[in-house]
Image (cartoon, rainbow, N blue to C red):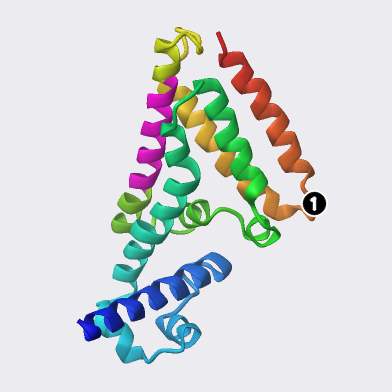
Amino acid sequence: MQQQLKSEVTRQIILDSAFTLFYESGFKTTSIEKIMANAKLSKGAFYHHYKNKKELGVEVIGIKLQKRVYEGMIRPLYETGNAIEILESTFLQRIKSFAPYEKQHGCPINNLINEIGDYETAYQIALKNIIEQWKSALTSLIERGKTENTIKQNIHSQAVATYLISAFEGVRGIRKLYNDDVILEEYMSGLSMYIGQLNK
């Protein structure tokens, strides 16, 4: 049992190290050697847990990124309350919560989509799975709002979900170009106006 625990701790250290380096330096330029040096572990420890960098990459997406998106952008959508208010608060609160470090480096999932989304099928599938879960949660909330008469009936729920995700991810990328939050403030203002138009 003690060995299993130690092994799991080591695996988590590797995952954390990989996530940080992928986020800060990019996936393609981050080697196994860099990951393990950052984790202060031997290369042998890497191959005890993973066959190659591809396997690690898929797990970083499926565990680290999945949890990040779920906690920040999916779980809040399933809360009870007015659908319009939940939509607005989820996106606005998330934008407001980002530290300078996260604003500087952008969105981890968006960075990986742009870098390796068309690079390897396994990465594409893992990344797409997160986006589809997010889109599904948004669509469900919008449909609930239509049922409860807080959102207009003629709204195309999936189209709105896709638009909201795309705008959010887009501004996260654009923010990397700036030294202040003006672009985020403009996005939040536009988001509020857009969501207001969905209101019945």
Query: Which residues are the magenta region?
Result: 128-142
Residue 117 seen in the current view: no
Type of residue at label 1? Asp
Asked whether residue 87 is drawn in magenta, I would say no
The front one of 77 and 166 is 77
Where residue 17 appears, as percent x and y from the top left, is: 46, 75
At 30% across and 50% down in the image, what residue appears? 125
At 53% across and 28% down in the image, what residue appears? 86
At 39% across and 77% down in the image, what residue appears? 14
The front one of 89 and 161 is 89
Where residue 29 appears, as percent x and y from the top left, is: 50, 74
Asked whether residue 131 is drawn in magenta, I would say yes
Where residue 135 appears, as percent x and y from the top left, is: 40, 34
Above or below residue 148? Residue 166 is below
- Residue position for label 1: 180
Residue 33 seen in the current view: yes
Where residue 75 appears, as percent x and y from the top left, is: 42, 40
Q: Is residue 31 left or right of residue 192?
A: left
Above or below residue 176? Residue 44 is below
The front one of 143 and 2 is 2
Q: Is residue 36 left or right of residue 171?
A: left
Residue furthest left as drawn: 1
